[in-house]
Image (cartoon, helix red, strand yellow):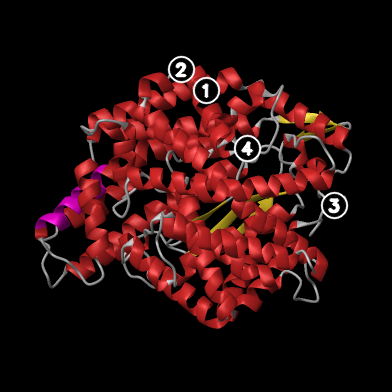
Amino acid sequence: MFTLLPQTAEEITQWTWPQIEPYYHDLESRPLTAKNVNDWLADWTSIAARVSEMYARLHLATDCDTTDAEAERRFNTFLENIYPPVESAEQKLKQKLLASGLEPTGFAVPLRNMRAEADLFREANLPLLTQERKQVSEYDKIIGAQTIRWEGAELTLQQLRPVYQNPDRRLRERAWLLAAQRQLADRDAINALWIKFLDVRRQLAANAGLPNYRAFRWKQMLRFDYTPADCVSFHRAIQQVVVPAATRIYEKRRKRLGVGTLRPWDLEVDALGQPPLRPFSTTDELERKAGAIFWCVDAQLGGYFETMRREKLLDLGNRKGKAPGGYCTQFPIAKRPFIFANAVGLHDDVQTLLHEAGHAFHAFEASHLPYHQQWEVGMEFAEVASMGMELLAAPYLPAQEDSFYSEPEAARARVEHLEGLILFWPYMAVVDAFQHWVYENHAAAADAQNCDRAWAELWQRFMPGVDWSGLDDAMVTGWHRKLHIYRVPLYYVEYGLAQLGAVQVWRNALQDQSDAVAHYRAALSLGGTVPLPELYAAAGAKFAFDAETLQEAVTLIETTIEELQTV
């Protein structure tokens, strides 16, 4: 019967639960032995991958146009009528495999994950998880609708960002304050939605018999290789090693701008008064020039990206009604990734595409693995794939005839990127520490004013160097504008850990580019078949939280910045 499964995206997205159910029933009722376990897993992958692709395509449609009522209806129908019974059916298959005692080759890590998922599963949580996904859509709608009038045109707040690179400080300030005013207009709406998020998350943990949502989420995210205490250690290391380096960057910027204090609208303009980098004017140009870079990094990677261009697996431009952010999703039946972004012509957009392409290359490299459970990779390493690609690609920004930049412009862009790495770690610590506080202090966090205070305290601890005087409301509500807190709670430390891994991959490339890329690709091809420390080791890096490893990375970054500033 599995030969009758739908083959095209159109067929898959039209599927209903009565059409899906017989396949799960067959797998549940089929005897499971050492002789047939591989066929059984292959059939399970056939059905599960189609459901996954259905979710990915329906969700993507709502993000591409948040005003599309029909796309929203179809996605909600999936969440209400397909997602809950599929989760129940998946749970039964996990229990069946675990009860068999069988361990197919390359399945040790997936089985470990299944045991945790089976232990965490509660039927009562299925409607709550659906409710949470709907709340995420509400948050996206609020953010996606934020526009202002600027010079006679209606702009999204993302489209306003180029103004922050204007050398006219008063113009930058006016634009920044307009954006902040518009964001604060949604303060009450986001605070009200926040309470709904917390109520759902508290109940999810309670239903699973866990003390708080952090414990629930830790297990849900399959974090076996580190603990909350390791995160706290990482925060301390960042405060010790990175905050001083970040402060040096801010002070250098302040002096170059010739201002008494740095204000939030002073952070994106070129400190030497050079005109803003404008690497591209159309998304086609962005795609073409990025593709040339990937061919330089590695021919196979260049081929992967060309496939994505040819098959129209990119939606990169910003527009009204489009959900915020950027990401790479996967269509597992098609064995293709898809990149979603909000480009407006900035260098950040180039970085975003390089980043998300790393995720796409990960999907291509791991697609040879036979079972869908082997495709699931912890974000702590998935982000090494993306952040590593940013750094591996950076030397080639000016290398082609049809390139984004001249040599001096590329050096400037790379300095901006490398300084951004240093400035990111403290911000990551704020976001991660804030969420640890929220889910350890659930009752207090239900009061938005307490959240404002907690965010402000962490901001002052990790983010010195920028003057927010007179902007208290905008500063303390920074947690409103970090979409991960709403969409993917407690998913942010991965970026900090992976950035440390990516810098180590880059360090190796400085010594031997081809060898470093070979190790990088080999690690990606492992998918989720080995634990995190082994994935890092395969890529030539160390999975670390300590100040010593962090100091080595910061020293390399600062040394490279000094070298690039002589170009």
- Nearest to the observer: residue 509 or residue 547: 547
| Residue 134 sits above or below residue 303 on the image | above
- Nearest to the observer: residue 478 or residue 510: 510
Mark 2 → mark 3, Cα distance in angstroms: 43 Å
Disc 3: which residue:
272
Mark 4 → mark 2, Cα distance in angstroms: 26 Å
What amino acid is found at the position of numbered circle 1 in the picture? Arg
Q: Nearer the viewer, mark 4 or mark 2?
A: 4
Q: Is residue 255 left or right of residue 554?
A: right
The answer to whether any part of residue 155 appears in the image is: yes
Q: Which structural element holds mark 3?
A: loop
Horizontal and vertical percent for residue 427?
Answer: 56, 42
- Nearest to the observer: residue 5 or residue 306: 306
Residue shown at 58%/62% (left/top)?
A: 555
Disc 1: which residue:
453
What amino acid is found at the position of numbered circle 3 in the picture? Leu
Disc 4: which residue:
464
Disc 2: which residue:
447
Mark 1 → mark 2, Cα distance in angstroms: 10 Å
- Name which of mark 2 and mark 3 comes first in the sequence: 3
Q: Which structural element holds mark 2?
A: loop
Horizontal and vertical percent for residue 23?
Answer: 26, 54
